[in-house]
Amino acid sequence: MKTLLATLLAPLSLLGAEPAPVLGRIGDIELTTAELRETIAGLEPEQAAALSKDAAALEQYARALLVQRMVLKKATDDKWDQQPAVIARLVRARETALTESYLEKVSAPASDYPSEADITEAYDKNREALRVPKSYQLAQIYLADDRPAGSPAPAALAPLEKRLKAKNADFPAIAKTSSEDAATAANGGLIGWLTENQVQPEIRARLPKLGLGEITDPIRMNDGWHIIKVLDIREAHTPTLDQVRSQLVARLREERARANRQRYLAELLKDHPLAINGIELSGIPQKTSK
């Protein structure tokens, strides 16, 4: 049986003239493949791309759509859409969506922007900003201790250190059974990749002295004791142009679109000067409060 993701991503040409398959239903409300595709097509490109790569997120999105349709049906059955206040909100929402959509259209950069020269120039100008700081892949064993600083080490700390210093000590196994941080303990103590600036100062000061696979002595911090293991190290580096090309293209197009929008609005106001009646405006708070 095809997954929801596989069904959704199947080319339309493969569906032929048959009705789009029903992906889900709630009560008598159905959601078809075509309807879900149409909805996703209206999302921001980043959100649509994320859904196309994550079957679980896509299924959750489809479920949310079905629930939304059920609530919408209840609302229309109760004639909620005919309430004056709701009508006013719908009008404002429509105007906002239409305005924003039109501004996106008139502000969109040309399809061939940016050029290769534009991308290269942006890369050269932003080399320092693109630089990736030194990073560490770390794991930890944590013992909670909320006593004041200077208190004796907890009784469990010395036996733990002894186990870690034993020949062929299995850090992940010890972390799973001894660490009191549930999130990392479940993964053998794994914290993951952190840049130097993301590491707390008390720990960061110890890292330059450690090689791969080495562990710190217990480090006393406000929340307790941390024993850190260095799993891997990435030296500071600047990514190649190819590695950041898509990032640069997205940023350049976003900046151009923003500039195009500002220019369009400026020209619009130049051709159609805006005026506000200050006297009338000053009376609005009093009128609305009555």
Image (cartoon, rainbow, N blue to C red):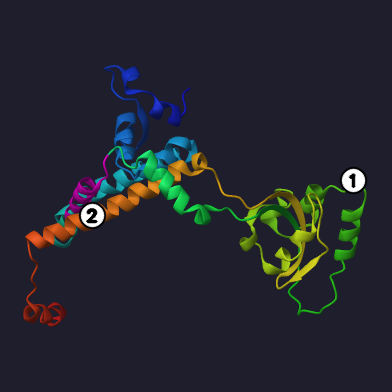
**Dot 1 or dot 2, earlier in sequence:** 1
Q: Main secondary structure of the magenta part?
A: helix
Secondary structure found at label 2: helix
Q: Position of residue 169 (x, y in %)?
A: 87, 48
Q: Residues within 10 Å of mark 1 (few under 14, many from 20)?
A: few
Q: Position of residue 139 (x, y in %)?
A: 73, 53
Q: Which quadrant would the C terminus be assigned to in this image?
A: bottom left
Residue 101 shown in magenta: yes
Q: Is residue 232 left or right of residue 102?
A: right
Disc assigned to residue 261: 2
| Closer-to-camera residue (42/252) | 252
Q: Classify residue 112 by image quadrant.
A: top left
Please state which of the two labelled residues, at mark 1 or mark 2, is closer to the viewer.
2
Q: Which residue is mark 1?
A: 168
What's the mark number on residue 279?
A: none
Other residues around mark 2 within 10 Å, as few (<14) / some (14–19) / many (≥20)? some
At horizontal 10% and vertical 81% (from top left) the residue drawn is 283
| Magenta range | 94-110
Look at label 1 and name its amino acid: Asn
Q: Amino acid at mark 2?
A: Arg
Residue ID at (47%, 50%): 124
* 162 over 104 or under it: above or below: below
Image coords of residue 131 (percent x, y): 55, 53
237 vs 138, left or right, is left
Occupied quadrant, residue 135: bottom right
